[in-house]
């Protein structure tokens, strides 16, 4: 993904009080995902590595490999823990930490974990449909990580990211630019008959499912409301748990925010009401 650096990995005084233990540079889900990926990568370097990679990689439907291996139902999950080399896993895990740590601190470990796997498995399904008839498998956590990148851009759209540690660019433009590059690259490599387009569609799939998930959670829609949304106009009502801001006409006072933060410190983030969560996220954008 290139050399990237969020302008401010250290949170403001408000953000440092957001979770009971303050802002965690290595929150639980990020730590577990990184450790698991590293452990699997080391197994890939062992004598059983070739078999493990072959069984765990995401193969296109209808593809076959010597020995009878091909697509299996577990692969949309296991492919996320396979990597093709040290650089592949290093930059994936670095990007996961840089952009995911702040998201996990905001959303909580449970919601971040669900989001990560929704993006990764969603990326796999998009990739399966995009690569029918191809002989190439897909490995790597990039689909899920592109979903994390999208979440960062939606939660902190005006946060500056330093591209190659030199060029500042706002997160919303950075994410949009990456999505455009992946879209063009995917169709461009396909037109040239190259198998390298596989990862591009996985990346787009991760971002697509991430966008759907965040939109769903931010509006707190039910399945029935989704169908009504598809049928005609009208926006379902609901607080913005995953939105970088709440009702534009409501501004919580400092006393209210302090009370909410104290509640988190004593009872945890999940004890907040939807209204309190919306006020807290709205305050974080000020």
Image: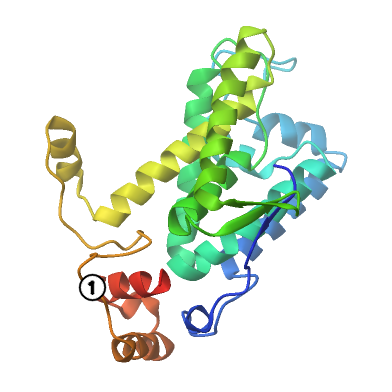
Q: Quadrant of residue 229?
A: top left
Q: Residue at x 63, y 21 (%)?
A: 197
45 over 281 or under it: above or below: above
Q: Residue at x 53, y 34 (%)?
A: 179
285 over 157 or under it: above or below: below
Residue carrying label 1 = 275
Q: Residue at x 75, y 15 (%)?
A: 66
Q: Quadrant of residue 268?
A: bottom left
> How many discs mark residues in the rendered view?
1
Q: Residue 217 placed where, x, y %?
A: 31, 54
The answer to which of 107 and 69 lies nearer the viewer is 107
Q: Residue 201 placed where, x, y %?
A: 55, 27
- Mark 1 residue element: helix
**On-image quarter of the C terminus:** bottom left
8 over 87 or under it: above or below: below
Q: Residue at x 52, y 23 (%)?
A: 128
What is the basis of the colouring in this image? rainbow
- Left or right, 155 with reference to 274: right
- Left or right, 149 with reference to 197: left
135 over 273 or under it: above or below: above
Q: Residue 215 placed where, x, y %?
A: 32, 48
- Viewer can see residue 59: no
Q: Residues within 10 Å of mark 1 (few under 14, many from 20)?
A: some
**On-image quarter of the N terminus:** top right
- Viewer can see residue 55: yes
């Amino acid at each position: 993904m290139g050399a990237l650096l969020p302008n401010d990995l250290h949170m403001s005084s408000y953000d440092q009080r957001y979770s009971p233990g303050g802002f965690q540079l290595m929150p639980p889900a990020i730590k577990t995902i990184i450790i698991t990926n590293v452990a699997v990568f080391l197994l890939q370097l062992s004598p059983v590595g070739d078999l493990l990679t072959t069984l765990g990689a995401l193969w296109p439907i209808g593809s076959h490999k010597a020995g009878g291996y091909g697509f299996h139902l577990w692969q949309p999950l296991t492919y996320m823990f396979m990597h093709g080399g040290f650089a592949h896993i290093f930059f994936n895990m670095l990007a996961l930490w840089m952009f995911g740590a702040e998201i996990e601190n905001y959303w909580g470990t449970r919601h971040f974990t669900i989001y990560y796997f929704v993006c990764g498995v969603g990326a796999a399904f998009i990739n399966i449909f995009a690569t029918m008839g191809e002989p190439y498998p897909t490995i790597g956590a990039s689909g899920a990580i592109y979903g994390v990148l999208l979440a960062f851009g939606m939660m902190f759209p005006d946060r500056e990211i330093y591209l190659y540690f030199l060029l500042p660019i706002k997160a919303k433009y950075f994410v949009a630019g990456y999505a455009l590059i992946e879209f063009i690259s995917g169709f461009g490599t396909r037109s040239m008959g190259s198998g390298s387009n596989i990862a591009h569609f996985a990346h787009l799939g991760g971002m697509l499912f991430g966008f759907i998930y965040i939109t769903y959670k931010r509006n707190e829609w039910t399945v029935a409301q989704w169908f009504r949304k598809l049928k005609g106009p009208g926006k379902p009502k609901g607080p913005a748990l995953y939105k970088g801001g709440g009702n534009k006409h409501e501004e919580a006072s400092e006393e209210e925010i302090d009370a909410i933060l104290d509640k988190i410190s004593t009872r945890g983030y999940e004890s907040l009401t939807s209204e309190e969560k919306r006020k807290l996220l709205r305050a974080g954008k000020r």
